Amino acid sequence: MASLEKPIVSFLGPIASYSHQAVRQVFPESSWELRPAATIDDVFDQVQFGEVKAGVVPIENSTNGSVVFTLDNLADRNGRYKDITVDGEIFVDVHHCLVGHRNPSPMLDLDDHGSGTSTPTLNDPRPSKPKSRPLANLRHIKRLYSHPQA
């Protein structure tokens, strides 16, 4: 009698991360159980020890380039992952949008020097001062730090 349990695929979590989006492209939830993992090492360990049938980890991203934790594990210099092979590649097309609404405020002073940032160029990759006047002062914007896998 065949087992009714679905095979498990592990991915670098959390749910709704880019790795989760990638795993959903190839492993339909109707046929696979999708298991988020906290780290790339966790995904590799689960595959190596037979806890899951497959694993999906990022190898490259558009923000930081190569994902060195994945590449180090694939190089396997310590012999931890001798049974792991790369079976495929999944591409996730990523687009970000900054969405907001304009709220008239005295803090939006167009005569101020703005955020004090400037765009790097080939001739000046680390500019020290603005090349042009910013459109608005953004100092009132609150920075919100997020989990790196969000």
Image (cartoon, rainbow, N blue to C red):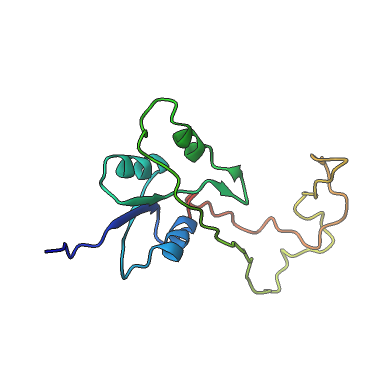
Q: Is residue 20 above or below residue 147?
A: below
From the viewer's perspective, is 129 left or right of 50? right
Q: Nearer the viewer, residue 37 or 126?
A: 37
Q: Residue at x 49, y 58 (%)?
A: 18
**Does residue 78 sit above or below 97 in this rendering?**
above
Q: Nearer the viewer, residue 147 or 56?
A: 56
The mark total stands at 0
The image quadrant that residue 6 belongs to is bottom left
Camera-nearest residue between 139 and 101: 101
> Relative to residue 51, is residue 116 drawn left or right?
right
Give residue 133's position: percent from left, percent from top. Answer: 86, 56
Quadrant holding the N terminus: bottom left
Name which quarter of the figure residue 50 lies in: top left
Q: Residue at the far top: name it.
A: 78
Quarter of the view holding residue 48: top left
Residue drawn 53% across and 37% down? 68
Q: Residue 91 versus residue 120: which sits nearer the camera?
A: 91
Residue 13 place in picture, x, y as percent? 40, 53
Q: Residue furthest front?
A: 1
Q: Is residue 43 left or right of residue 7?
A: right
Residue 26 vertical placement versus 37 (above, below): below
Give the image location of residue 59, x and y in percent.
53, 46
- Looking at the image, residue 59 lies above or below residue 34: above
Residue name at image x 81 percent, y 63 percent: 135
